[in-house]
Image: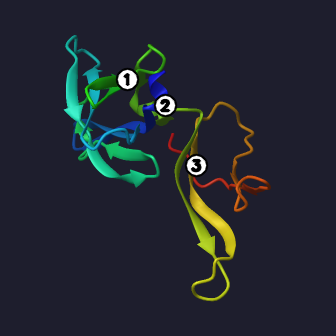
Amino acid sequence: MSYEFVRLKSASLSLVGGSGELRSHLNVSVKVKNVAYSKDVQIHYRGQCDSAWQDKPLTWKGNFGNYDVFALEPALDLDATQFVEFAIRFVAGGTTYWDDNSSANYSLVPSAGALTGDNVTLSFANLVFGGTPGSSYVTGIAGEILVNNISYSKNVGVRHSSAGWTSSVDIGASYSQSFG
């Protein structure tokens, strides 16, 4: 399955502008497995009335463990499109990997809010150290977890281990904001 090599982190389609001129902007963030130094990561997309597919390269944003994060930068301007369909293509070491939402492609409308590639996606996490400066005592975890709104009631958190997973601690997350 290609999802272990390339996966949508988040995507949103927003309408912006005023004075009678609306523009649609597509934002996409993707993570790819660091399997080669040279990587070609692109969004393969088409707008509401487009029959032809187009490709747009994504920009490297940073490294996160065994993965690299890529994003559309700047956001893709789609005129006033009210619908976009897309998939993610990742080429490394002569092999092409796809995240096409299990062969269904991703689709967005401006009122849909944000998509995440899975129902739960860790956007980022950092350990918070306490005590004296230079202390190795972990007092918490700061970060962002994106979840699809599939239920009103949610229990979201992080499981942390500093003992090689012989023991672990569950840390609950608190609600921050909605994207849609």
Residue 79 shows in the view? no
Q: Is residue 42 above or below residue 179?
A: above
Q: Of residues 103 and 149, which is closer to you in this image?
A: 103
**Callout 1: 10 Å neighbours few (<14), some, many (20+)?**
many
Amino acid type indicated by mark 1? Trp
Residue 127 lies left or right of residue 164; in this view the side is left
Q: State left or right for residue 153 relative to residue 81.
A: right
Most extreme residue toward the bottom, as rendered? 132
C-alpha distance separating marks 2 and 1: 10 Å
Question: What type is the residue that disc 2 sits on?
Answer: Glu
Choose top left, top right, bottom left or bottom right for residue 79.
top left
Relative vertical location of residue 48 with respect to residue 4 in this rendering, above or below:
above
Instruction: Check disc 3 and report the residue beneath it.
Output: 145
Residue at disc 2, secondary structure: helix
Nearer to us: label 2 or label 1? 2
The spot of residue 36 in percent (x, y) is 31, 40
| Label 3 SS | strand
Residue under label 2:
4
Circle 1 SS class: strand
